[in-house]
Amino acid sequence: MVKAAMQSSNRIVGSRKWWALATVLLTMFFSSMDQTVVSTAMPTIIGDLRGFSLYAWVFAAYMMASSVTIPIYGKLSDVMGRKPFYLFGLILFGIGSAVSGQAHSMMELIAARSFQGIGAGAMMSMPRATIGDIFDPKERGKWMGVMGAVFGLASIIGPTLGGWITDTFSWRWVFYINLPFALLAIIGVIFTLPRVRAESRVKVDWVGSMALVMGLIPILLGFTWAGSKYPWGSAVELSLFLGGAAVLGFFFLWERKTADPLLMPALFKNRIFSMSLILGMLVSMSMFGSVMFLPIYVQGVVGLNAQDSGWVMAPMMISFILGSIASGQIMSRTGSYRVLAWASGAIIVVGSFLLTQMNMHTLWTTVVLNMVVLGLGIGSLMPLLNVAVQNAFPYRMMGTVNSTQQFVSSLGGVIASPIFGSILDKAFTHKLAATLPTSMKRVPLAGVNPQALLTIQAQQSIAHAFNRFGSAGHHMYLELMVAVKSSLTFGIERLFAVAFIFAVLCFIGTFFLPELKLRGQEYFESSPTLPTSATRDDTIAQNKHA
């Protein structure tokens, strides 16, 4: 392994690029595995910590913290190099993982996941930017496909590993498992990524960053509480939405005036960039509405345990790998991507529609088939959007454009998480009240929620509570479990319906994505610094192909 030397740019050449690639893939592997491991363990976690209403916030807090830091990491890494931010992110991610494993309440877990997310912001933006430091856009399609395959492989191993760890040891170890991988990645970054000599100073847009966070939090809280804790039209809800909107309004005005904005307004003048952001947000929202809640459906409705649900999720990730590799190969060989985007969007629509047809009697084999179709579409489209955006701007802006795209895509997940969580919580509560037999409604059921289905321990605890009703207690318990299962199915059906709407909008949006022929080695030779001039020739080409 060659020790990294001081240089003036982020370019990685020679034999060292393969070691750098290995480090990138390792980071991608364990950061992606973290998400799927935690997702599979979440039903057990909420059963242990008793926080179903805060389920979505475990993901939202992580995604919000990582999303806001992504543009900062990207902008600074263009000038100061990827290496220091890679190391900073890995260290924070490791600390956050250790603290998450020590959580004893949902609020503690959410706080720890927020800290972990700050480190994850670097791990989300640096790998794709580093691939851009190694390969030109035409080659990049193939390697972005490989990165997608690594993500898919991690997603296959993650659910199974998460289920096995949860069932065999404890859900806390799904966080501790990150630590050895983080250590290996830190060693790889130290020896393979170059140290870049900063030629100019970059100011961090702290005002914009804080304004974005302070604007998003009340809006996300509003979606989480609306219809459950507070009525939609209540003073609290209106204050949250209007207050958040006002702060976001200030954020957009600030970004237009500040010298070093968190989100560079000039980038949005590029049509490829703008449409890729819209498509990325829509596919992210559709994916979160489907994938994030599938473990609850598989365990709570189909009736599998945590480890078996991991096996059921694996075929979706296999199809994700196949779609990602095929998409990358097609782009590298043809140099184009527009028709491929149409096909990928259509497959996502079909997969999302199939999920809306599932009910409480659906077999696990049908669930697998539906997820395979959805995974194929998502796996094909996501690397395509990355390559299209990177190809539309000069190399010197790689980190900035890449991180902005990643930020907006992550923002889709941040917005979707509490919305879908609120839909599930409200639909479940409403359906349970209507489904329970009259005799059961006289029984105090405060706190009953889908966690009653998700762990054997929770079910045994509820069954024990019904023993005080004598011989009729067991029958009442069975009636309750049927009502809970029916209500959970009802809520998840509503989730899938909303996710399907986002999928349809994504498919429509693919027809508005302009195409710019993928460039080869000349991409590294022409590197103007201003986005307005840098994209002038690209814009002409875009209008020609649009």
Image (spheres, helix red, strand yellow):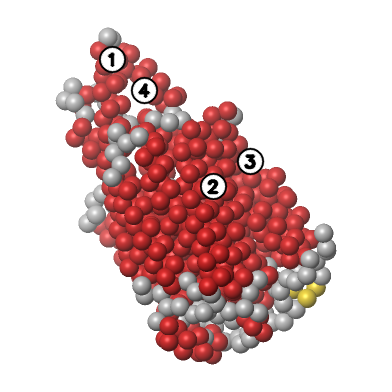
Disc nearer the start of the sequence (2/4): 2
Mark-to-mark CA distance, 3 and 4: 31 Å
Q: Earlier in the sequence, mark 1 or mark 3?
A: 3
In the image: residue 141, left or right of residue 243: right
Left or right position of 515 against 77: left
Residue at x 78%, y 70% (from the top left corner): 14
Q: Earlier in the sequence, mark 3 or mark 4?
A: 3
Q: Which residue is mark 3?
A: 176
Which element carries disc 1, helix, strand or loop? Answer: helix
The label nearer to you, 2 versus 3, is 2
Looking at the image, residue 70 lies above or below residue 32: below
Tell me the amino acid under the disc marked 2: Ser
The residue under label 4 is 462
Q: Report, in whole angstroms, how far the alpha carbon at label 2 lies from the one at label 3.
A: 17 Å
Label 4: which secondary element: helix
Residue 155's disc is 2
Viewer-proximal residue, 277 or 237? 277
